[in-house]
Amino acid sequence: MTAQPHQAAPAGALLGPRIVRRLVSLAARLGIEAELFFVTAEGVMPAGEPIRIDSRYSAGWAGPDDIPELVRVEPGTPAALCAERLRSGLRCFAIKDGARIVAKMWCEMDECRDPGWRRRLDDDEAYLFNAYTDPSLRGQNLAPSMRQQCYAALRAIGRTRVFSCTDYTNTAARRFKRKLGAIDEVLCLRLSRAGGAGRTWVLRRWPRRPAQDAS
C-alpha cells in the first residue's frame, strides 16, 4: 500500500524562501530532515508560441539503445536501473544532438515514487522527475523546449494531467515552470529522521484547473 499524505487545515500567508531555508537548517541541527514543497501541475495554462531550438536537435522518447547516453548524463545512475525503468513502463523524453543526449527527463506512468508524494497515478496522469540539461548548452532554450515537447508527447498518449514536485525554496524552478503554464496545486511538508520513515502533511490546496492545450 502506498503512503498517502495526511491532511491539515489550510495554511495562511506563505513564508518567504529565506525564512523557510533557516527553518530547514534549524531542523537539520535537531536531526530532522524537513522538506517544504509544492505539487505542481505542469502545462495547465497556455504558454504562448512553441519555444524554438536549433534545427540540429531532435526530440522524442529514449529507448534501450540510449541507455549508455542516459548513464553519461546522469552520473551515479546504473545502466541496470535505466533498463529496469524502461522495462517497467517509465518513459524518458530526450533532446539529442545526433546520438548525444543533451537534455532529458524521466516520466513516471504508473506510480509517483517521490517519497513525499507517493501514490498511484490515474490513466491520464504522468509524473516528471530527474530533468537534466547539458550545462555547456545553457541559453539555447533546450530545457523549456524539452518540457513543452514532452507535454505534447504525453498528451498524444492520453496523459493530460502532468505534474512534478517543486522545492518551496527553489524560486528559479518555480519561475521556470510558471512561464511554461504550471500552477502549484498542493503545498506539503515532509518531516523525517535520518534512516527513518518520514511523514507528509498537506498544508494547503488550491483549486484544480483543467489542462489546456498549450501547443
Image: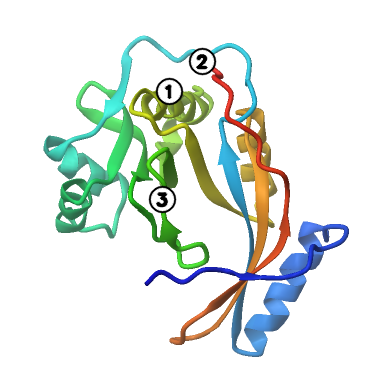
Q: How many marks?
A: 3
| Residue behind mark 1 | 152
Residue type of the residue flagged with mark 3: Leu
Distance between mark 1 and mark 3 Cα atoms: 19 Å
Residues 75 and 203: in front is: 203
Answer above or below: position of 132 versus 3: above
Please, what secondary structure does the residue beneath circle 3 have?
Answer: loop
Is 114 left, or right, of 96 in this rendering? right
Residue 56 position in % (x across, y down): 32, 12
- The residue under the point 68% across, 82% down is 27
Gap between marks 2 and 1, in whole Å?
7 Å
- Residue type highlighted by circle 2: Ser
Of label 2 and label 3, which has the lower sequence position?
3
User: Mark 1 or mark 3: which is in front?
Assistant: 3
Q: Which residue occupies 11% across, 36% down?
A: 65
Please state if 145 lies on the left or on the right of 72 as rendered: right
The reply to whether the C-beta atoms of the residues labelled 2 and 1 are less than 8 Å apart is yes
Location of mark 2 (residue)? 215
Quarter assignment of residue 80: bottom left
In the picture, the quarter occupied by the N terminus is: bottom left
The residue singled out by tag 3 in the image is: 121
**First in sequence: mark 1 or mark 3?**
3
Colouring method of the image: rainbow
